[in-house]
Amino acid sequence: MPTTSSMSTLLRLAAVAAACAVIMALVGAGTADLATGPRCAVLAVSAFVLAAVGALSALRALARSERECARLREQADDARALRDAVMDITPVGFAFYDRDLKYVHVNAALAAMNGLPAKAHLGRHVSEVLPALGTSLAPRLARALESDAPLQDLSLQVETPAAPGETRFWFGSYSRVRGAGGAVLGVIASLSEVTERMRAEASLQDHEGRLDVLTRSLPDYLWGGKLRDGVLRDFYCTPVIERTTGYPASAFTGTGPEGTPAPLWAEMIHPEDRTRYRECIESLALAPSTEVEIEHRIICADGRVRWVRSRAAASGLDDRGGVHLGCVVTDITDRRLAEDLRQRLNDSFRRSAAEWRRTFDAVSSPLLVLSADGIIHRLNDAARVLFREADPAGQPLAAAAGAPPWSSAGPLVEELRATHASASRQVHDAESGRTWELSAAWVDEKASEDPRIILVATEVTRLLELQAHVRRGETMAAMGAIVAGVAHEVRNPLFSISAVVDAVEATYGAQPELKPYLDVLRGEVRRLTHLTQELFEYGRPTRGEWTDGAVGAVVAEALSACALTGDKASVKLARELSDALPPVRMDARRLFHVFRNVVENAVQHSPQGATVHVTAEAVEEAGRPWVRCTVHDGGPGFKSEDLPHVFEPFFSKRRGGTGLGLSIVQRILEEHQGRIRLSNHPQGGAEVTILLPALPPAVIAGPLPKSQVS
């Protein structure tokens, strides 16, 4: 087809030829009058000139046309080079097909996608180059040749030599190409490989499916959104929220501006927990990239209140100062109910244990619970007192060697371990003078693999003392009756003998030879009278005037009564009486006789110049309060062979003694539920210790009268 420049050149040549023809016609008309020869010469010259001018014009026009063609060819080459460069550097594959669907041009990207060099495509039908691709692509290209609208294709899946054995995914766009005259030149196709994107989408769909399955299978529900300026935006929650709350997920989403949750989201929180919950969630905006956890209550659709644990995490701040929130909400109602039940059970167990412990400690008898191997498992307060307030729990019973009566319980426990029965025995502690009845039982529950030994100690000291007192009282009563009868029978003859001595002295007192005999008779009468008086005292039945008061006054009065005896024997009396003596229950007259008798014995057994020390103080022995009075003389002390007999009636090693003094003292002290102990002092001399039970402050009746001694 002629180009624009060649057409312009032809038009110029036609114009020149027409101008020459006109000029020749004018010359011919002007030379019509000339002869044929000259006329022909003029015409020939004119024609030559015109031909030369025309040839020159044609040559110039042709030269311009050649230059224009060269320029146009250069522009076409530049445009082709630019097209090839653009098509080669683009990652999208381009191909141009003629109307027979043969490759006219293929860029480098498409050649690489197909796995063939570009030259292997040119001039060949699409199905000839790549049969698999051509089979799918040829119908699409044919439809594009028939349509002015571009066609797009998202479902192209083929294998190529570039990746044999692997299905690749392509996105194709096809467009028909027309020439300047409107004729269809062919079709251009652009192909983009979307294999990775399709795989990513498939993987994303797979993960979304898995996530959906997981979120639906979990008992917990999740919610999330963006927290900015204290407002929760772009809110979402998983559908399983309905399992816990009874509300569908749609009840909370899509109702507020900017995706804020519906008011029901806040109203569902229990009123007592709303402030705490809101502060906890909002704290994430102040501390991004952190986590918080809170347990709170929610009100379900049916009105039930359930406990949940919300564990929320926040991302870092975005460019607008907000954070992305994610929260997992777990229903912990069953756990809270279990904890409440466990707490109630624990409280009940503690109350039961406390009640059992109080009951256990309220038992007045000391009680031990031992394991089968003799380890102390538990003990009550009464037993702990016997351990001197130490707690031996967890220690073997054998470690209680210095804690009677437990130190004597070892053989009893060994017997139970062998017999698995029960046993009892009586043990006595010589140091404290206390006697115990130990009872032990083997406890082996059927469902228990840990048998126990129950050990109970019952103090029978007082019982044995009462029994001994009763026996001694019966003996003393019998002896007292006999002694009282003898004293009564002796008293009358003594009175007659005393009267006769007085009469003889009155009648014959002036005779000096009779005076020694009368003095002997009178001394013997006094001795027999004193013996009779002690016999009456020994046999006197128990009756008196009992009062509650301090014993210090009675001791002081007894010392005053013994002062003359001490002066005659040149023995000093030293007293050390406490001012804070507790009261005792006593018969002051008979108790005066006790202290007077003991002090007089101490004076009589002390050498001249010696000192008898008398003390009185409050003490505690064997767990009981006492008033202890001690009389320490300066004599030789007691002989060891005499100690077992000193309280026997009529036993005396002192010349002129009746042997009834200490017997009477013991009897009076037994009436007062007191005790008397005889020993030798480490520094020499005898020591008599008198113990009287002290009264607790609550039973004090009143002060003791100043003197009740007659």
Image (cartoon, rainbow, N blue to C red):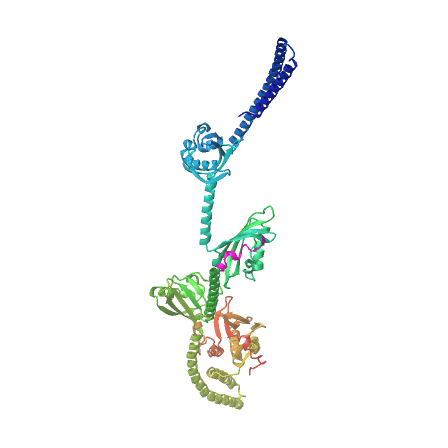
77, above or below 633, in the image: above
Residue 406 pos. (x, y %):
43, 66
587, above or below 342, in the image: below
Q: Work out whether residue 148 or residue 489 is closer to the camera in this orientation and state it.
A: 148
Quick check: is 254 in the magenta stretch?
Answer: yes
Q: Quadrant of residue 510?
A: bottom right
**Numbered label tally:** 0
Quick check: is 12 in the magenta stretch?
Answer: no
Q: Work out whether residue 534 or residue 54 is closer to the camera in this orientation and state it.
A: 54
Q: Work out whether residue 585 or residue 226 is closer to the camera in this orientation and state it.
A: 226
* Residue under the point 42% across and 69% down: 457
Residue 330 pos. (x, y %):
49, 56
Residue 312 seen:
no
Residue 73 pos. (x, y %):
55, 24
Magenta range is 244-257
Query: The C terminus is located in which quarter?
Result: bottom right
